[in-house]
Amino acid sequence: MTDPSTAHATVQTAVRTALSTQRIETPSWGYGNSGTRFKVFAQPGVPRDPWEKIADAAKVHEFTGVAPSVALHIPWDTVDDYAALAKYAEEHGIALGTVNANVFQDDAFMLGSVTHPEAAVRRKALDHLFGCVDVMDAIGSRDLKLWFSDGTNYPGQDDIRERQDRLAEALSTVYDRLGRDQRLLLEYKLFEPAFYSTDVPDWGTAYAHCLKLGDKAQVVVDTGHHAPGTNIEFIVATLLREGKLGAFDFNSRFYADDDLMAGAADPFQLFRIMYEVVRGGGLTPDIAFMLDQCHNIEAKIPAIIRSVMNVQEATAKALLVDRDALAAAQRSGDVLDANAVLMDAYNTDVRPLLAEVREGMGLAPDPIAAYRRSGWQEHIAAARVGGTQAGWGA
Amino acid sequence: MTDPSTAHATVQTAVRTALSTQRIETPSWGYGNSGTRFKVFAQPGVPRDPWEKIADAAKVHEFTGVAPSVALHIPWDTVDDYAALAKYAEEHGIALGTVNANVFQDDAFMLGSVTHPEAAVRRKALDHLFGCVDVMDAIGSRDLKLWFSDGTNYPGQDDIRERQDRLAEALSTVYDRLGRDQRLLLEYKLFEPAFYSTDVPDWGTAYAHCLKLGDKAQVVVDTGHHAPGTNIEFIVATLLREGKLGAFDFNSRFYADDDLMAGAADPFQLFRIMYEVVRGGGLTPDIAFMLDQCHNIEAKIPAIIRSVMNVQEATAKALLVDRDALAAAQRSGDVLDANAVLMDAYNTDVRPLLAEVREGMGLAPDPIAAYRRSGWQEHIAAARVGGTQAGWGA
Amino acid sequence: MTDPSTAHATVQTAVRTALSTQRIETPSWGYGNSGTRFKVFAQPGVPRDPWEKIADAAKVHEFTGVAPSVALHIPWDTVDDYAALAKYAEEHGIALGTVNANVFQDDAFMLGSVTHPEAAVRRKALDHLFGCVDVMDAIGSRDLKLWFSDGTNYPGQDDIRERQDRLAEALSTVYDRLGRDQRLLLEYKLFEPAFYSTDVPDWGTAYAHCLKLGDKAQVVVDTGHHAPGTNIEFIVATLLREGKLGAFDFNSRFYADDDLMAGAADPFQLFRIMYEVVRGGGLTPDIAFMLDQCHNIEAKIPAIIRSVMNVQEATAKALLVDRDALAAAQRSGDVLDANAVLMDAYNTDVRPLLAEVREGMGLAPDPIAAYRRSGWQEHIAAARVGGTQAGWGA
Amino acid sequence: MTDPSTAHATVQTAVRTALSTQRIETPSWGYGNSGTRFKVFAQPGVPRDPWEKIADAAKVHEFTGVAPSVALHIPWDTVDDYAALAKYAEEHGIALGTVNANVFQDDAFMLGSVTHPEAAVRRKALDHLFGCVDVMDAIGSRDLKLWFSDGTNYPGQDDIRERQDRLAEALSTVYDRLGRDQRLLLEYKLFEPAFYSTDVPDWGTAYAHCLKLGDKAQVVVDTGHHAPGTNIEFIVATLLREGKLGAFDFNSRFYADDDLMAGAADPFQLFRIMYEVVRGGGLTPDIAFMLDQCHNIEAKIPAIIRSVMNVQEATAKALLVDRDALAAAQRSGDVLDANAVLMDAYNTDVRPLLAEVREGMGLAPDPIAAYRRSGWQEHIAAARVGGTQAGWGA
């Protein structure tokens, strides 16, 4: 029989190891300007090109130690020489990660991209997706993330079912183009920018398509892309059980796809999600943990650092759940005890633990404070003058 | 080239044929008392046993001509001699239809039925499901409809993923028990009575289970079981495309699972759903069109007649959509024209057409008025005195 | 005793009169480009200045006969000479209507306008509002419509209650500046662009402020600005009862503030709203009936014509409700009959009636077809080349 | 200048005082059986009459020290001798608190109580409300809490506006009957059991009525009675600013009015609400802090103890917010810092602080454990056998 204190120490070690080896990918576009349809407010020091975005992403990793890669968005991050971009990233201590395709901003895509009624437009969209795989090949990226804004605004506008046929054909074509170690990650979203029907509106649709495509096709859960009242952790548990969870896009929301900092709107929900990840064996490199956020009014780099920390805190709490006690209470049908075991972990203040983990990694215990002390914000505000700031949106 | 007026006549004939051969199954429990957790209000003349429910269901068919079967709910409709019950129905001009299992009202099922943590409780639930198949065998029913209230009220209460394992095992066991021409219809529901997690909360979950079970397992769409903002017709189109739509439970709602008369809350939505049914080839006997409603404060039989009529009107409008014009507008990317073609059908007053169809079937043109003239309501109010009214709920 | 057929004829005359004298104001910005945060798609022929917007608005009135004014948005519609603009409108057969203030696109307003923590920013916002009243004075406008994007994205970002104090002060200051026959119309909205708290999020907040301001302050109901499940017609009935309904911003939505064509997403809801307007005596010039929509992917002028027609159809159905029969059924507690009386009006195809009304006004019976025949769309597509199209958004 | 450590000690003392003097009222019906429309599951030891409910409520106070009163629900808690009931409560160390009226379970109220179309039914409802005030007089209760299930299920069923007239008349009549130190607390709820329109659906409606009634009429915020996405703390802040917040009904929900344990579904929301209470000066006896919950599947007494503790923890965190630092960050427009100050308090583990507070009050630090050790649960399970358990619902 194991000595309880030894067991406790073992758990603690495992928790610390898990926390120090966690990997959270940050989005290149999160460093640029963003906004709503009403206004994009510019901020000082915002990057003007992919190189500057990478420099910012490197800072997030420098102070958190768990954000060693940055996701690209094509064509926002188009450069002439991707090998040079990858080398640049490496020199800054990070890697280029997931490639995100953008088939929603070309004028041709007003009524759809891969599901557009016209074959010529669909071809144009496919060509863009192939180009994204080319970028992956060039930078050694594993994952192609596909989110389609495709849908309709009015009943009758297009045939819902034919659009599924067109979608299936496009996905299959792209899937066939993937290299042996490359994956297709399919993201769903309830609505916006399409307001009546969306072609991949829910996890069921993404799952059904991925199932037909094969093992290299996986579903992406963006935590802001659900109808009100949706139990997201149920979806996470289900997709893990089905072997079809490929990635997360973390962010938080009060209403729709608000793209606020992860954990800012409902930290308890983020904890419940991370608990299902831990419980389902999902804390592995096979699941890509990414942020996908818009820092419309707050400073971008510290907002991303805060988001990384929020994911870390939710993960720490999830790791601290006493799984044996929980299972015992669940088996006995003691609703209150089972809930109490989970809440006990959630109510724990894990910030001291994470500070220790950071110190063990040679980092400052408070990444936000360290970033502020670093002078980087002042540096970029002064240096990045002139030119056009990177941004996205209308 | 076809003469336009001939083409029009052909369409009209097809529409009338489709409307006169449509089949809508009514629910035995819809004739009984129902209510909310706050109160069940009793109504005069409500049936006191399955036989009286069948007599009421027969009246709905007598005046509408399109409701030739009634669904049973076990154990609410338990009788000693099912063959006699089936014969009684036949004598009244209708058939017994789908068998609905009830594994949510036995005291043992407080924390779940087929997903309960205890094997003994799961066994008890399975035995009930087997009993339902026995009833199907006895009455010659094709469809076993399974809705599970299983879920949890509090985070941590039970293991979300293990409950899926238990569910999969139970479904598989029941599936194996089905006869060659019998089907398992799996219904999903967002929430209620479980308030944190529900074990079959959405179409994706039902679909994933049915896919593994096999061809005889199909998904049921209850129009009141979705999160706010869910595009139900998209789900209908998708399930038809996948060959996995087995049945509808029609009703309407403004908020949650209000179980109001079909078409009462959002007639345009019901039309859009029926359009996808028609467009997807779903107006066949392979799809069971059922009502599942609670007439808490309105007279039950006329409410069911009204619901049947509302489904008919939505179907008529869906059949009247000019599919060629719609396809042409969709192909050309004319958003307004495509929408206008659909709305043109929706804005048509189809009540005269349906009155004609009814007269062609030898029925009165206004089923509600005919029912009122029949004196049935006065008869049952006077005759069904004493005994305990059938009802459901807490 | 009145002869029934005479009574019927009287009702019909009243309905036709009401329909031919209805007034719906169209929004200048609806003629310009719009979109989502993801993309604004440009369309050919879109106006490049307020003068061209007015020309387009005049076309809508020319073909519908019930859209005799156009609302301005300042600073989008800023011109040097407002008297000239008003004269230009008059020459085109329409008037300038409501003045809409825009205090959400200046860089200073990132964290708020009239509720901003800094007094200097609040002053700047107030100055803009005063400028809007100046425009009203110049063009003889009655109504100042105020919608504030003010709010916060994160809990703690600002003090919710102090923002109310600041709001109250600003409203009071503007109210005092109004002329004797001018009104302040306060619009509420659940969320967007603020994602955590919005300073005027619901009708209760707008009502409470208007009550304190006085008789010239009234609430605006934008049909797309509510939480899911909100009964908008209840709010309309309540505000009419309180004498505090000042105006409508019509549009429709499936999810959030989608700004689709009025009546496109839920025509039954629009009918219910118009029924409460009619029943509450709101079909008067004291209530401003405006459209506020974004035609992101459909042709703008015909989309606005369609929206006007949709409002007309809902109004016609509302006017056709047999109020005596409804009241009788309601008094007797006959739920089904009362509902049937209302649905009977809704299910009526009022398009022939409206065609007749139009012909009685000397108009073509089908405004969309007439607009298309007019050649205006081809004219503006050819003429409005070069320059910058009007638009709004990020 | 104050020494920081002295200031800190002062804050700590104030926090402890606030926590030890907090008052949370528990609901008599929370100790009884409850359920959904699908099933009420009975539990062992559940009270069979008001006296036994009081004994249970006394236990909650015994172990928490902050639940010194129990709310009654009439007629569920009808007794012959209210003075004796009050004395019984006093002997058990608690007081009788708010009187809740129930005008939703009598057969006469199927279509409404105070808003029913028939005057005789309205009179019956009013008589019941008068009876409730009689009970208040008898037991010395300050608050009459009114929640009306009144509403309609179908459009057209009744006249929305006339129902407001009837409501206003009834409220005014009851208000006039109140004693000098008695209050009328008006509760709103979005929906259920009415599914189309509810006569008091939102805070705006309750506020408008209370405003007209006078100072003794105040609004009740039930945390489960809002549309999805509603910012409840905004409503709390607004009502406090208006001097119209009278009471809370705490509970939590994931979907609709789930009536789960307070703080169980969204503890961060409960914290934000309590922060606005603290910030708005609402932590006074003028605001009644009540629970209103249904423990359908969990043991009732410990569930109520847990709920009390959850409210305490949210209050403690709210009290710990560094208001000066928050105000400074807000004034400077530092979104991230302001949010961080609030989150710092939320992320604090306040359970040790509350354990200390309890020990300072002479209580066990863990009320749940203490209750379990007490043997009360075993006692009531053994003693309360025979008779009919108290319960509510259909």
Image: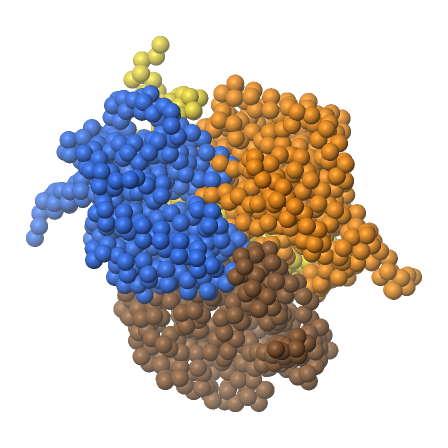
Chain colours: A brown, B blue, C yellow, D orange
Look at 77% across and 36% down and name the residue there.
Answer: D91
Question: Looking at the image, which residue is at 31% across and 49% down?
Answer: B132
Q: Is residue B84 left or right of residue B132?
A: left
Q: Residue furthest top?
A: C1
Residue D381 occupies quadrant: top right
Name the spot of residue D173 as percent of width and height, x first. Answer: 64, 22
Nearest the camera: D301 or C312?
A: D301
Q: Nearer the viewer, residue A386 or A103?
A: A103
Residue at 73% over, 50% down: D63
Residue at the (38%, 66%) spot, across then down? A206
What percent of the width, then of the height, locates residue A255? 53, 55
* Left or right position of C330 against A19: left
Q: In the rendered image, which quarter is residue A114 located in?
A: bottom left
Q: Nearer the viewer, residue B274 or D355?
A: D355
Q: Is residue A88 visible?
A: yes
Q: Is D209 placed above or below D361 here?
A: above
Residue C247, relative to residue B197: is it above or below? above
Asked which quadrant contains residue C239, the reply is top right
Q: Position of residue C135 (x, y in %)?
A: 58, 45
**Place of residue A94 in the rendered image (x, y in percent of width and height, measured from the top left):** 56, 84
